Amino acid sequence: MGAGHAHPLYLDRAGRVHRLAPEVKIVAVLLFTIVVVLTPPTSFWAFAGYAASLAVVALIARVPAWWLLKRATIELPFVLLAVALPFFGHGERVDWLGMSLSVDGLHGAWNIFAKGTLGVLASLMLAATTTMRDLILGLDRLRVPSVFTQIATFMLRYIDVLADDARRMRIARLSRGYDPRFLWQVKAFAVGVGSLFLRSYERGERVYLAMVSRGYTGRLPQVARDRAPAGQWAVSAVLPVVSAGIAVAAAVLT
């Protein structure tokens, strides 16, 4: 797997967070997300503490705030769903600016918005500081089932090839005067998708058999350092430990 396959979310920086082993960053983000999800939605100041913790990590990793905010817009569909909850929720209601809003709906909307935003920002931080190859390598070191890492590896390696195939098929279709833009012209598009799937499936079979014949055992080749040093685990544990402390303090004080 070539090292040149860097995903568009990766920021090439010479920061401390970038130099951490991928598995310690994956575990840290996972534990942080679990703490956020388990926090009751009424612990408002706890979410402010989580956001401040991510801001500190972003500052250390030299990830611009505007870069994070722009890419966090991926959660907009969920935010729109959250906005509708106060209007259609049941139970106790309050009046605000002439509108009748459900209290449970307001809590549900805040729950979706706060936890979703923090989860997206944490994931973006992980993607910004870790290359795709290192992400897959980290999952492999964490003993994720090899079938998942194999699929991700092949996808990373051949996604550009599939994109080129799709582009050539589209050009060939256009050169024959068929440009499906409406519902009744969708047959050509469906045929193209089916043909691309079969071509990709057959190529995957050939590539896999060729790799097996050359000694591929289903696991990624390991670099010199198989395990992350204990110091890196301790550094990465700061974020989930601080988050857990914030959650416990919020539970005690509320």
Image (cartoon, rainbow, N blue to C red):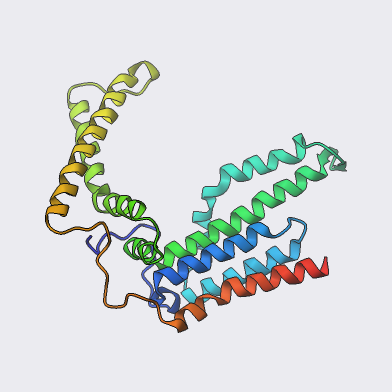
Position in image of residue 98 (x %, y %): 85, 38
Position in image of residue 207 (x %, y %): 17, 48
Q: How many numbered marks, from 0 up? A: 0
- Left or right of 13? Residue 118 is right
- Left or right of 68? Residue 217 is left
Q: Which residue is rendered at x = 24% and y = 21% of the image?
A: 178
Position in image of residue 153 (x %, y %): 29, 55
Q: Which residue is rendered at x = 64% and y = 57% of the image?
A: 37
Quadrant of the image containing the C terminus: bottom right
Quadrant of the image containing the N terminus: bottom left
- Depth check: 248 or 216 in front? 216
Please tell me in which quadrant of the rendered image residue 166 appears: top left
Q: Which residue is rendered at x = 64% and y = 40% of the image?
A: 81
Q: Residue reaching furthest bottom? A: 231
- Left or right of 139? Residue 86 is right
Please tell me in which quadrant of the rendered image residue 104 appears: top right
Q: Can you see residue 121?
A: yes
Q: Can you see residue 67?
A: no
Please tell me in which quadrant of the rendered image residue 243 appears: bottom right
Position in image of residue 210 (x %, y %): 13, 50
- Depth check: 161 or 13 in front? 161
